[in-house]
Amino acid sequence: MRRRHVSNGNDQDDLDLSASVHAESLPTRKYSFDSNEPLLTLHQTLTPDGVSLTLKQYVPRVSSTTSTKTPLVPIILAHGLAGNSCPFDVTKTRSLAYSLCEAGYTVWLSNMRGSGTSDRPSKAWTLDDYIYQDVPTIVHFVRNAHGDIPQVHYLGHSLGGICILCALADVTPSLQPYIKSVITIASSLEYNQSVWRFLAPLVPLARMITSDKAISPEAATTFALSFLSLVPSVVSTAKKIDKDTLASYQKSLEPVSLPVIMQLGTSIEAGGLAISPRRMEEQKHQSEGVLMKNRLRPTHSRSSDDWFEEEKEEGEDEGRREVVGQREEEIKPKAAARFLDIMHKIQTPILAIAGNNDVQCGEEAVLRTLDAVGSARKRYVLVGGVQEEEGRTYGHLDLLLGERAKEDVFCHIVSWVQEADSGVWERRVKREKEEEGEEEEEEEVVEVDERRFSESCRSIGL
């Protein structure tokens, strides 16, 4: 199956896009499968704007260690910038996908537009395309593939984590009812303390460059290798990724769309990643529509006679309109300029993982974003923190490809999703509500007793 280049919605290729779902066996595999290894298939789906996305599905073999009475919630893995699904399954020993399958989970490795075998549009795509087109399409495709299951887990590395956070906070209709939990690895919405801040002076110059094309794979590779030669720790620290694995990663680098880079560049600024002007305009129209509905909706029930009351005097009516206008201005929601400003909308449980020596996305950046999320169930894991004296330092890509990633990183992810699917959270919430109800009942009893005591005192003249 080869990648299709899309210039408009009418282009045709050797791929049959008459259906939104395709599945076939992959022609090659990185390692041979035995009876205990997962089944691997390739699927395709279309975004609303007509871009074909590919997903790899890993289905665990049924065995005594993976069988379960109720199907586990499937997990979507989303890649980072200039990458594809490759880092999630490079070798059998360094495969997050394989580790999750061993725990009994069906895993979906997604490829957003321009990555892997997904369509690469001839016109440059934007970060908005990832957030508002690709992420919702992937989530609903996986749900439908499992018989319209209620929820999925979603894990994103770097850019993949940024996209799911932004989508959860701003996609309409909301994706939150369909996401069981979110796991971000080395993801933040604010990078003003990152190594990338040194590129800030280049942002104005970059904005002068024509942004309707994507950087070629060759240019992306050249840029990445040049940057790695200047700052080796950008990707890996303490040489935790062997040369062969790193070479495989470098060969998998994908083209980078300039508009994506330009919007991501705003994360270096104070306040973090900016919402695009186009999306802010859409938010403005949506808020105006809500305001119009509220204006037309009666604020209280009225009898039929009320609707035919005589009109008030003209001066009084004008005064009332002025007051209403002032109130509308006060309640009219303003479009947020930064994604950090709307992270409080996210109520989905989230696990945020950071590396102790990640110069791209440090622990402070991860924590700032996590603190902005409104969810009551949040967990933070700093990998390499307690093992630092043993030489276990983790950079940006070490978290996926490091020689000890399975025991230092993957174990936290498996534990998180298992806890989420065990029903522990729901039972805990139920118990907390019951305890709150008991406290309220006790308060009501106390209030009743105090009232009766006061009445008794008055009756006897005290």
Image (spheres, helix red, strand yellow):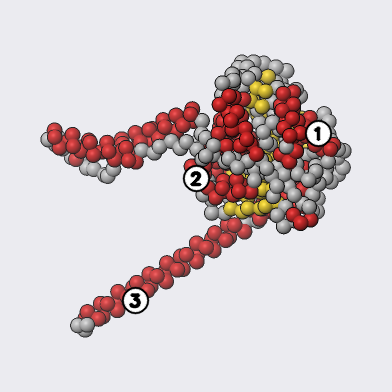
**Residue 355 visible somewhere in the drawing:** yes
Number of residues whose C-alpha sits closer than 10 Å to that of mark 3, classed few (under 14), some (14–19) or many (20 or more):
few
Quadrant the N terminus occupies: top right
CA gap, disc 2 and disc 1:
39 Å
Residue 268 is drawn in which quadrant? top right
- Tag 3 residue: 449
Image side of residue 347 versus residue 214, left or right: left
Quadrant the C terminus occupies: bottom left
- Tag 1 residue: 248
> Which residue sits furthest left?
313
**Residue 50 visible somewhere in the drawing:** no
Horizontal and vertical percent for residue 352? 63, 48
CA gap, disc 3 and disc 1:
74 Å
Horizontal and vertical percent for residue 412? 70, 53
| Foreground disc of the pair 3, 2 | 2
Element type at marker 3?
Answer: helix
Q: Measured along the vertical axis of the image, is residue 301 above or below residue 83?
A: below
Q: Measured along the vertical axis of the image, is residue 446 above or below residue 423?
A: below
- Tag 2 residue: 345
Could you tell me the amino acid type at mark 3? Asp
Q: Compare residues 379 and 459 and report the one nearer the observer.
A: 379
| Foreground disc of the pair 2, 1 | 1
Horizontal and vertical percent for residue 431? 54, 63
Residue 390 is drawn in which quadrant? bottom right
Could you tell me the amino acid type at mark 1? Ser
Earlier in the chain: of badge 3 and badge 2, it is: 2
**Rendered residue at 33%/73% (across/down):** 448
Q: Are marks 3 and 1 in contact (CB under 8 Å)?
A: no
**Rendered residue at 52%/35% (across/down):** 274
**Rendered residue at 70%/51% (across/down):** 383
